[in-house]
Image (cartoon, coloured by chain):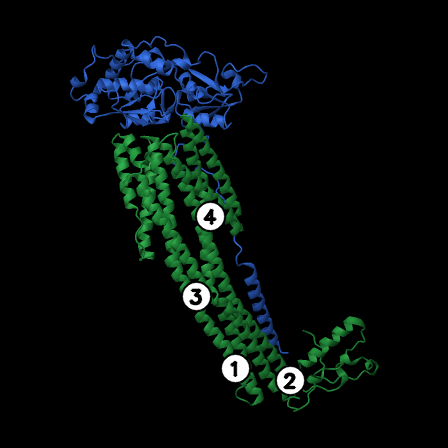
Amino acid sequence: MTAPPPPATAPPPPPPSVAPLPAVSRPPATSSPAGEPVPATGPAPGPTTAAAVPASGIRGRLEAVAASARAGMSGSPGRLRTVGIVCVVATLLFGLAAGQSFRSADGALGRAAANSDQLVRIQAIQTNVVQADADATNAFLVGGLEPAAQRTDYTEAIATASGLIAQAAQHQPADGAALSALNQSLITYTSQVEQARANNRQALPIGSQYLRSASADLRADALPLLKNLGEANDARVTEEFDRAARASLWLVVAGLLALVVLTLSLVWLARRTRRYVNLPLAVAALVVLVTMVGGTVGLLAVKGNVDTTRDGVYAATLSTARARIAGFDAKSNESLTLIARGSGAAFEKAWQASSGAVKAEISGLEATAPGLSPLPWDGYATAHAQIRALDDGGDWEGAVALATGQAANSGNATFAAFDTTSGEQLSALSGQTAQQLDDTGGWLPFAGVLGLVAGVIAALCAWWGVSLRLEEYR
Amino acid sequence: MSHRQRRLLAVLTVVGASLAVGACTTAGAYDPTPLFTPSAAASPSPSATVTPSPAPSGTDVATTNCLQSYAPAATLPTPDKLPAGSTMAKIKERGRLIAGVSADTLLLGARNPVSGRIEGFDIEMLRGVSQAIFGDPNKVELKVITAAQRLPSLEDGSVDIVARNMTITCDRWKEIAFSSEYYRSGQKVLVRLGEKTGSGAPIKGMADLAGKKVCAPNGSTSMDKLRTFTDIEAVGADTHTGCLVLFQQGAVDAITGDDTVLAGLAAQDPYADVVQAPAFTAEPYGLGVNQKNVDFARFVNGVLEDMRADGRWTKAYNTWLADSLGKAPVPPEPVYGRTS
């Protein structure tokens, strides 16, 4: 469009030889100035805009169309038409942006929910893995004759974990590689535990070595992978929460742009046509304004709800899951301390660290979810202190009996109370998180359609307003 | 169409296009979750994974001089007449003897998975000491330690005595005190049943294991000796049982250690075979005590004298070792004369 032939400014000499071109070469009827001769640079009417060269075929036709388009955009009606097109494009773009804004918020919320589901899944895998390890190590304390209930518990935990790994891989392809590595390390773990069992059953000391080795490998390989998975999914949830909060940006930017275009057009029209307000165009601007303000308010409300969920029930879900993981880890370490029989200082240290983590999560939960009753960790911590006192006092058998017994004050019984309560709390909280995210974004798909419709309505109004003025040129 | 209008259209097009592109490409596609890169992960557990063994601390062949311990009193004081202020009196006051032992060295000191008790030839020696202090063989708290923890746990006082197939060496005398020799072992090697050399001959000793991986516990005299065979790749583990796990997993080709220990390993794996050749080192076992507790070392030597004399030593040997190592030999002669 940089070197237009100047058909509008100078009356070219009529070349008689090019006259017999077909009708395409003529400017369309609407572009011919029919009414007021207001513009100073009035075009020369007539068949002068025909292509200069009698080119044949498609090329010729294209050139002819381009020429006629140029003619249509020229002069006052042409400018008017351009303004109309700009307004229509701006409002339609606004409609698209508004639709996209809501769609993006909706998509982000959906993905945030999916990612937080995945995070809960990953934490469930971790919980089951450490639970299985706690069972295996605890059962080892009583020798080759493993309690049937504990063995069942171990088997169930491993089965659940491996099922969840497959599910998690299905739900998040980006986790695939890490999950397959996790699967491998879980297989190594279970095979070592089985080898420990088989040797234990024959009363061979090498059984305990296989168990220690399994437990150590689990901590060296599987737990770091689970940590990575948890962190990656947590980061994804945060990313989507942020994206949902940012979604109104589309709406505001496109809305402001459309408003600027419409306002400039209104001013331009007012100057050119001696009318103060072009009503349909003003309505278009109003529609854009209302959609923008209304949508932004709605999206801000979504952001508010998202923030509440994130700092409240979602944070509480994560906290509870972390408390469970640390709790099971502590239980494993208690057993490993006893198995190490006097040289388990490192395991006891790990127990203290895990117990500290549980307590920190419990006090954090008081802040994020004030309504919840605190998890019953103290009962188990007291039992553990007694177990340590017995062992450190030289009564190893007594310590093992207290740790593995089923009496109300035993390590296993008090820990079961923590396990049950925290498990119930976790499933309740993660259900609430999903519910709240769902409730927050429920209206967004509908709003997306409304945004598009608003854009189309504004575009129609804008075109209507401009064509009212165009009519005057006919 | 004016220049300004064209520019406006262009801007709108660009904004629209970028919005559309932005909406389609980024949402929902994430970077893959990072994998764990294996490194020296801090794990509190003694693992059976292959660990580089520490540099040799200088092989030391036990000499007669180094076997010298402190001479016991002519007669052992009875439990109610222990010298006031002595180490034994303090142990009696505490109510139990704290001993560092192995829980996975079958025959010497191993946990019986059925009863949960730790038992073996080493443990019988401790029962004798407990009998002499308390008049009761069972007043012993058994602390399970690794081979490498034997000296440190004596030095920091966390155990009173160590009975964990420990060889008396001049180097160790610099850090702890030993009782007189209570058993004479020797280092041998354990291989897969039916393992042959490259030329098809049966394995007769370490010379036939050139180029193979051989495992021994870190911080043991067996490892020090293994290090002297430069054409063998030495692999360390925390305990001999850790070596057996590596052996069963195929990570090492052979295990070297004292004949007593290897007999315990072979008893757990019918496909493990102790090479029938004379031991290539002498491993005189002693009970370790803190260097400062010379009175306790003398007392323990007195206990060992009594056990040799009244047949308890032979009885313990017959219970634990005779099946694997043949009938009881004459107990090793004690060597005294150390004064400082």
Which quadrant of the figure contains the C terminus of chain A? bottom right
Point out residue A424 in the picture as x, y percentages from the top left corner.
37, 51
Colour chain A is painted in: green
Q: Amino acid at mark 1?
A: Val
What residue sits right under mark 4 in the picture?
A: A229
Q: Is residue B180 left or right of residue A224?
A: left
- Residue A42 in sight here: yes
The disc at residue A192 is none
- Foreground pick, A459 / A377: A377
The earlier-in-sequence mark between 2 and 3 is: 2
Q: Earlier in the sequence, mark 4 or mark 2?
A: 2
Say which residue label 3 marks: A302
* Location of mark 1 (residue): A283
- Residue at 61% x, 84% y is A467
The N terminus of chain A, quarter of image: bottom right
Q: Which chain is blue?
A: B
Q: Judge if badges 2 and 3 mark residues of a common chain.
A: yes
**Mark 4 and 1 residues: CB-CB less than 8 Å, in contact?**
no
Q: Is residue A319 above or below residue A339?
A: below
Q: SS at mark 2?
A: helix
Query: Which residue is at the far right?
Result: A17
Q: Which residue is mark 2?
A: A77
Choose the circle earlier in sequence order: 1 or 2. Answer: 2
- Ranked by sequence position, the earlier of labels 1 and 3 is 1
Q: Is the residue A31 above or below the residue B110 in the image?
A: below
At 70% from the left edge and 81% from the top edge, which residue is drawn?
A71
Three-letter residue code for mark 3: Val
Residue at 70 percent of width and 83 percent of height: A8
Task: State the CA–CA distance, disc 1 to disc 3.
Answer: 28 Å
Q: Secondary structure at mark 4?
A: helix
Q: Are marks 1 and 3 in contact (CB under 8 Å)?
A: no
Amino acid type at circle 4 is Leu
